[in-house]
Image: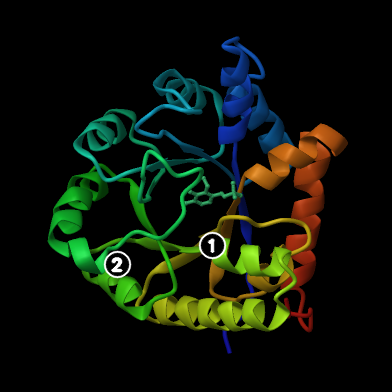
Amino acid sequence: MAVRGKLRLGVNIDHVATLRNARGSAWPDPLRAALLAEAAGADGITAHLREDRRHIRDEDIDALMAGIRVPLNFECAATDEMQAIALRVRPHAICLVPERREERTTEGGLDVAGDQNRLAGFIAPLRDAGCRVSMFIGHDPRQIEASARIGAAVVELHTGHYSDLHAEGRTDEAEAELEALRKGAALASGLGLEVHAGHGLTFANVAPVAAMPEVVELNIGHFLIGEAVFMGLGSAIEEMRRRMDAARQPGAGAVA
Ligand code: PXP
């Protein structure tokens, strides 16, 4: 049985930029949030530069690269524009996500299996530039196997559906989704992929995902930034960290 090692927490600061952009002002500053997250124990900072620049902007990415000490996980769509930016910036990690203009957030996983040849060519220069490339995918074995075939280093498993089921109190379905995520994590790890997970994670639903031994990193944003309104960003991150670590302990529960 796989042993649960230390789990990294990547804090996604996109929605600090959402709040800033709502007023067209300079605050709240995403870099300041990233530095606070770092001080509160974040192991990395994640930022998604969307094609429509609805939250993070190009200059935020430059400021984060210059200002933070922990690694930056640069999320983007697999487009020529984003590839050029990634090659200029050279972040520690690049997470490729599907993007549709009309969606509220990243709604599904990337179709790696259906776009293998293009994606293999897309990630090759990023890998050569020294970036760890991650595919944001569902737990479908075809997508996991395709990610391994094209030479991705990492897969990030989409926990959004599990999070929705959990929030709606559909316990049996949430448990079935968790089981599929567990199988996906084991398959990916067996294929030599590093396994991350994220989307929709909260204090209430994080434990069973954090308990998956193959998962080495969680990326969490919207809930933490929202919770910061009530308890402060540092405290929200510390509490998430505490819950993640508790779930990693031997014998910790792993049910939804
Ligand atoms: N991981 C990926 C690839 C994402 O696209 C997002 C959302 O931007 C997250 C994690 C974080 O999701 P949430 O904001 O719901 O915590």
Label 2 CB, ligand 1: below 8 Å? no
Give the CA separation, mark 1 to mark 2: 15 Å
Above or below: residue 57 compared with residue 75: above
Q: Is residue 254 left or right of residue 9?
A: right
Residue position for label 2 = 147
Horizontally, is 126 left or right of 22 in the view? Answer: left
Image quadrant in which you'd find residue 143: bottom left
**At x 64% / y 63%, what residue is drawn?**
163
Q: Visible in this render: residue 171?
A: yes
Colour pattern of the rendering? rainbow
The image shows a total of numbered marks equal to 2
Is residue 39 left or right of 129 when viewed as pictured? right
Q: Position of residue 212 (x, y in %)?
A: 61, 75
Residue 218 x %, y %: 59, 57
- Give the label on residue 92, or none: none
What amino acid is found at the position of numbered circle 1 in the picture?
A: Ala
Quadrant hosting residue 29: top right
Q: Which mark is residue 197?
A: 1
Tag 2: amino acid: Ser
Q: Nearer the viewer, residue 20 or 220?
A: 20
Instruction: Tell me which numbered mark, 1 or 2, is placed earlier along the sequence.
Output: 2
- Quarter of the rendering occupied by the N terminus: bottom right
The residue shown at (60%, 76%) is 213
Near-viewer residue (63 or 56) = 56
- Mark 1: give few (<14), some (14-19) or many (20+) Cα within 10 Å: many
> Which element type, helix, strand or loop, lies under badge 2?
helix
Rendering coords of residue 97 (x, y %): 38, 50
Q: Quadrant of residue 146?
A: bottom left
Vertical relation: 92 (above or below) 88: below
Q: Quadrant of the C terminus?
A: bottom right
User: Vertical placement of 92 versus 61: above or below?
Assistant: below
